[in-house]
Structure formats: structure tokens, C-alpha cells
Amino acid sequence: MSAFRKLIVGDAQADRVVPPSGFTAQLTLFAAGAMAFLCVFALALSLASGRVAHRWSEELARAATLRINAPAEQRAAQTEAALEILRQTPGVASARALSSDEQAALLAPWFGADVPLDTLPVPQLIEVTEADIGYDATGLRLRLQAEVPGAVLDDHTRWRRPLVDAAIALRRLGVVSIVLIGGAMAAMITLAANAALAANAQVIEVLRLVGAQDSYIAQAFVRRFTLRALSGAAVGMVLGMIGVWLMPEASQEGGFLTGLGFQGWGWLLPLVIPLVSALVAFVATTRAARKRLGDLA
């Protein structure tokens, strides 16, 4: 508690050892602010990727599509037969045939709004929703093959897993980016602290001659650089949160490229960034000060 109080309150005489402005101060403030700004976006990307992975996994796991590839004169009969089989299948919550307008809307992004479905060999689509207990996809395919020759069941397994894996990989990339940002900030602050210690070598020598301990001298550098990192990171965090807030909200049209901001309690997580930055600066400056003071002994 005493060390924490000294870090916050400080010592006026010891603070004179560290230059209040100059290259090292600007470098520390800029490095902490820039890294905190980037960390906010990396954190937002990681959280958004996690939400996307969970949503895709939940939605695609419970949805399937049944295609009726049959001649026009047989399509209605086979569609009704397939719907009857789906109603009798345990684990199928609901099944419905998409209307012509719904199928036209699905094809609109590729063929335009006025798709002539009557003149195109477009299969009839049936939307299948899975119940919590799930259904036997293999058994359902075998029955459909025997009773509805033109039916093809697609449970989205082939393309569901790559999408979910990609979202999970993006989340991991965000976490790795945060770790690398912290390491880069620690390196920059270490360089700034070493430069400040080297520039004040004569002052440190005088303080030693009058009886100042290395721990007393190191404390002045640690406090100054920790507070600089805290203030710089706070500014960078605020700017980063404003940038995330200005990003477009989630929309069906935008898909994955929208809704990459924070949601709910996630807005509180960036508040930890300045504290972590101060901790990184404290550790980095403490190590740098001890090493440099040992070299100057």
C-alpha cells in the first residue's frame, strides 16, 4: 500500500530527476495512446468475431434446405410428399416450401429483381428447421431417396464449419494482436526509459554522491513513465471507442462487415486498457531502471 501511495502521490524532489517534457515524454504518451487506440479495435474485432461464430453456429446448425429437382409436372407432387415425410420425421421442428417470391428474392442478388422463375429450371426449396433433439440426417436422406427421387437434403455441414472456423480464427487473431500491441508498447516505453536514464546520468551520479539510493531514483522514473502511459492510453482509449461507436451498426445487407462494435457490457472492457497499459509501463520501466542503474554503478 505504501508503494502504491508513493506511485500516486509521488515525491516532489524525486520527480525533478525525470524531465517533465521532451522526447521521452512525447514518445511515451504517443506510444501508449496509439497502442491503446489499436487495442480497442482489436478487442472489438475479437468480441464481434466471437458473436458471429456463435450466431452462425447456432443458426446454421438448426437450419437445412431440401431441394426438389423434378420436372415441372412432378414438382408439386414431390414437394407435398417431401413435406409429409418431414412432418413425420422426429427431430424436425418445422418444414415449409418457399414461395415463388421468396425464391426470387434469394436469386435477386445474382439475377436481378425480376427473375422469371416460370421459365427457368429452378428447383423447389423447402426450409427445414431442426428441433432441439435433432434428427437423423442419414436416415432422412435414405427415406427421401426411396420415396422422393428428386429430393436433395443439404444440412449446410459442408460450408457451415469453414465459416465458423474463420470467425473463430478472427477472434484468435484479435487476441494475438492485443498481446503483440502490449509487447510493442512495453518495448517503446523501455527505450524511452533507457533514453531518459542515459540523459540524466550526471544527475543520477550527483544524487548517489549525496546518499540517494537506487530504489529512490528508480521510483521517480517508474512513477513518471507509469502516469504518462496511463494518461496517453486513456486518451487513445477514448478516441478508439469513439471510432468504434461511429462504425455502422449490424444490418442484414451488410452481413459480417457491419456490427463489429461493442454490445452491452462489452463497452466496459476498453476501460481496462489504460490500467493494463499503466501496469505494462510500470513493469517495463522498473526493469529498465534497475538494469540501467546497475550499468551506471
Image (cartoon, rainbow, N blue to C red):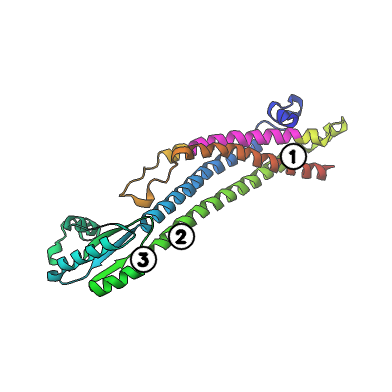
- The three-letter amino acid code for the residue at tag 2 is Asp
Query: Magenta residues: mostly which secondary structure?
Result: helix
Q: Which mark is residue 165?
A: 2
**Around disc 2, counting alpha carbons within 10 Å, would you say few (fewer than 14), some (14 to 19), or many (20 or more)?**
few
Whole-percent x, y for residue 113 in the image: 18, 55
Left or right: 32 as drawn, with respect to 88: right
Whole-percent x, y for residue 130 in the image: 34, 57
Image quadrant in which you'd find residue 110: bottom left
* Residue 3 visible in the picture: yes
Q: Quadrant of the image for the C terminus?
A: top right
Q: Which residue is mark 3?
A: 136
Q: In the rendered view, would you say 98 is above or below 293?
A: below
Nearer to us of marks 2 and 1 is: 2
Gap in angstroms between the C-alphas marked 1 and 3: 70 Å
Q: Which mark is residue 128?
A: none
**In the structure shown, which secondary structural element does the residue marked by tag 1 occupy?**
helix
Which residue does the image show at 52% across and 39% down from the upper left? 269
**Magenta-drawn stretch contains 223:** yes
- The three-letter amino acid code for the residue at tag 1 is Leu
Left or right: 179 as drawn, with respect to 100: right
**In the structure shown, which secondary structural element does the residue marked by tag 3 occupy?**
loop
- The three-letter amino acid code for the residue at tag 3 is Asp
Gap in angstroms between the C-alphas marked 2 and 1: 48 Å
Q: Quadrant of the image for the N terminus?
A: top right
**Around disc 1, counting alpha carbons within 10 Å, would you say few (fewer than 14), some (14 to 19), or many (20 or more)?**
many
Are the two marked residues, 1 and 3, in contact with CB atoms closer than 8 angstroms? no
Q: Which mark is residue 197?
A: 1
**In the structure shown, which secondary structural element does the residue marked by tag 2 occupy?**
helix
Which is nearer the eye, 296 or 5?
5
Residue numbers of the magenta segment: 219-240
